[in-house]
Image (tube, rainbow, N blue to C red):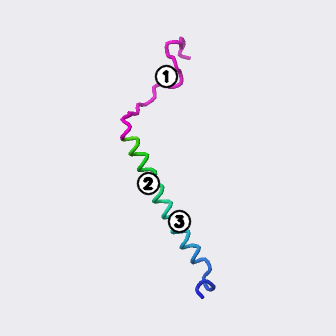
Amino acid sequence: MSAILNPGKDAKAAAAQQKAQQAVANDRQLAELRNADATSGATRRNPRGRRLFVTDPASKSDLS
């Protein structure tokens, strides 16, 4: 009888449950990525100028 009187109630509850499950899944994925980055041992350094795009800096004669 309540489904007849308030048809959107079940849909709202299902949407809220799905949103909560998606938030948990997102948190788990983010935690896994952070864990993988922490255990890889790689360090990030800021890119410096054009060296980011040049494969062999010795072959680059001009800086323009």
Q: Which residues are magenta?
A: 39-64
What is the quadrant of residue 27 in the picture? bottom left
The vertical placement of 51 against 31, above or below, is above
In this rendered view, identify the residue nearer to me: 34 or 44: 34
- Any mark on residue 21, and which? none
Residue 18 within the segment the image draws in magenta = no
Q: Position of residue 47 (x, y in %)?
A: 46, 28
The vertical placement of 51 against 34, above or below, is above
Q: Position of residue 51 (x, y in %)?
A: 49, 22
Badge 3 marks a residue whose secondary structure is helix
What is the quadrant of residue 15 in the picture? bottom right
Choose the circle earlier in sequence order: 2 or 1: 2
Closer to the camera: disc 2 or disc 1? Answer: 2
Which amino acid lies under the numbered mark 2 shown in the image of this protein?
Answer: Arg
- Residue pointed to by mark 3: 18
Q: Position of residue 6 (x, y in %)?
A: 60, 82
Dot 3 crowding, Cα within 10 Å, few <14, some 14–19, many 20+: few
- Any mark on residue 51, and which? 1
Badge 2 marks a residue whose secondary structure is helix
